[in-house]
Image: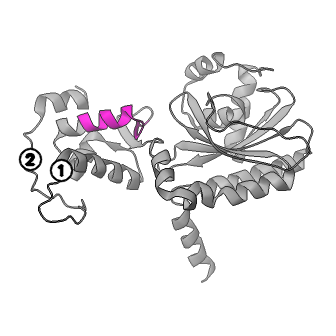
Amino acid sequence: MSEEQSVRRGSRPAEPISRRPRGVVRPAQPKNLALVKPVLNCVNILRYLSKSEHPATLTQITQKLDINPSTGLSIIRTLVSLGLVAPHPNTKAYVIGAGVIPLAEGALGRGGILEIFRYPMERLAHKHSVTVTLWRMIDEDRMHLTASAVGDGPVQIQMRLGQRLPRWVGAVGRMMAAYSGLSEAELRKKFNGLRWQSPPSFSAYVEQSREAKRRGYAIDDGNYTRGVLSVAAPVFDLSGEITMACGATMFLGQHPPATVAEIAEDLVTIGGLLRPDAGKRRRAGAGVKGR
């Protein structure tokens, strides 16, 4: 019997709103203001998943937050449908979804994380006259162009913000394949549905994905678009899933292999800065360095 079936059969009665589970911080409120418990439960679930270092099951979430399992299941299903929570691949657990990123961007405005890291993106773009991009994963098969910086060369590659592409194609696609955990048959099904101008063989795609995992970045050498070379590095969340990818797009033959590798390493650095725990890791590194 699945966890969801057990919830439907064995749900406990709803608890009074006055109960305050441990570890759940409730905001200060004006007197005589009645808080809506379903909204509180929703916010607490999002806060819990955003701080959790590992995917959490329905049981773990509802027990930790002291939420009725049936209610918790309904809330999580709704949050999943909105993209604010995502099922963890191959498990019955959940992680915070990429749908919260636009909300955070709107709240943070020009001081947001994308603006903070726009400078290294623009610096890289101008240094090598390439187009640097940031892609956000929006579901199992698509990614969304969230930000870009264009170099100042005489001929430029422009990419439209907001455009969507299959997440399995190009340099990003090879990186996604490397960390997907999909079987060869499942990956081949994804691969067969892709459109390339100069398609690689499936065996070459798989081998290039393995190489991407070994060195930390992937390269598409004119396969997706003829005459264009792209490089991509992953951005991981706290659970080790790829939620975004940093890319650089340039003309084929524009730079020698050594410079392409240098650009790729810079993308890996930018990807590390965009990790949710980047601040904590930088502080830890600074502490070690100062000893």
Question: What residue is shown at x 61% (from left), y 61% (from top)?
Answer: 116
Q: Is residue 75 in the magenta section?
A: yes
Asked if the residues shown at circle 1 and circle 2 are in contact, with their CB atoms under 8 angstroms apart, the answer is yes
Residue 24's place in the image compared with 204, above or below, is: below
Q: Quadrant of the N terminus?
A: top left
Question: What residue is shown at x 64% (from left), y 52% (from top)?
Answer: 271
Is residue 82 found left or right of 138 in the rendered image? left
Given the current orientation, which residue lies at the most extreme bottom position? 291
Q: Nearer the viewer, residue 62 or 204?
A: 62
Question: What residue is shown at x 14% (from left), y 55% (from top)?
Answer: 34
Q: Nearer the viewer, residue 166 or 101?
A: 101
Q: 10 Å neighbourhood of mark 1: few (<14), some, or many (≥20)?
A: some
Q: Which residue is mark 1?
A: 66
- Along the polypeptide, which appears first: circle 1 or circle 2? 2
Question: Which image quadrant for residue 10?
Answer: top left
How far from the left and from the top, in percent, is residue 43? 30, 50
> Which stretch appears magenta?
74-88
Question: What residue is shown at x 61% (from left), y 57% (from top)?
Answer: 115
Q: Secondary structure at mark 1?
A: loop
Mark identifier at residue 15: 2
The amino acid type of the residue labelled 2 equals Glu
Is residue 15 found left or right of 38 in the rendered image? left
Q: Secondary structure at mark 2?
A: loop
Q: Nearer the viewer, residue 238 or 84?
A: 84
The amino acid type of the residue labelled 1 equals Asp
Q: 10 Å neighbourhood of mark 2: few (<14), some, or many (≥20)?
A: few
Q: Quadrant of the C terminus?
A: bottom right
Q: Nearer the viewer, residue 75 or 177?
A: 75
Q: Is residue 37 in the magenta section?
A: no
How far from the left and from the top, in percent, is residue 75? 26, 38
Residue 250's place in the image compared with 284, above or below, is: above
Name the mark nearer the viewer: 1 or 2.
2
